Amino acid sequence: MSNRPGLAALRGALGHRRRNAVALVLAVVPVAVALAVGSRVALYGAALAAFVVWMAWFVLTAVDWLERADF
């Protein structure tokens, strides 16, 4: 266990640049492709993919925060 308070651990977990960049790219690229295609089904699929990426990012960040924090 570390001796860091929850807010410092949260800043550390949210400051993971590589995880944030990968999540951003994985969420934006399908939306850009769907907008280029212009299909409603493609837009739905891109929105679903972006949601899945966001949820995965959220869970990974929450786990990282809990590992860093000392409650």
Image (cartoon, helix red, strand yellow):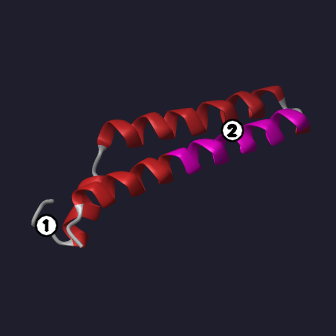
- Most frequent secondary structure within the magenta stretch: helix
Which label is found at residue 4?
1
Residue 28: x %, y % from top left: 59, 37
Q: Is residue 47 magenta?
A: yes
Give the residue at mark 2.
Answer: 49
Residue bounds of the magenta highlight = 41-56
Q: Secondary structure at mark 1?
A: loop
Residue 21: x %, y % from top left: 40, 37
Q: Is residue 45 magenta?
A: yes
Q: Are marks 1 and 2 in contact (CB under 8 Å)?
A: no
The residue that appears at 44% across and 34% down in the rendered structure is 22
Residue 51: x %, y % from top left: 66, 48
Most extreme residue toward the right is: 40
| Relative to 67, 25 lies left or right | right
Classify residue 71 by image quadrant.
bottom left
Disc 2 residue type?
Ala
Disc 1 residue type?
Arg
Residue 17: x %, y % from top left: 31, 41
Neighbour tally class for label 2: few under 14, some 14-19, many 20 plus, Cα within 10 Å: some
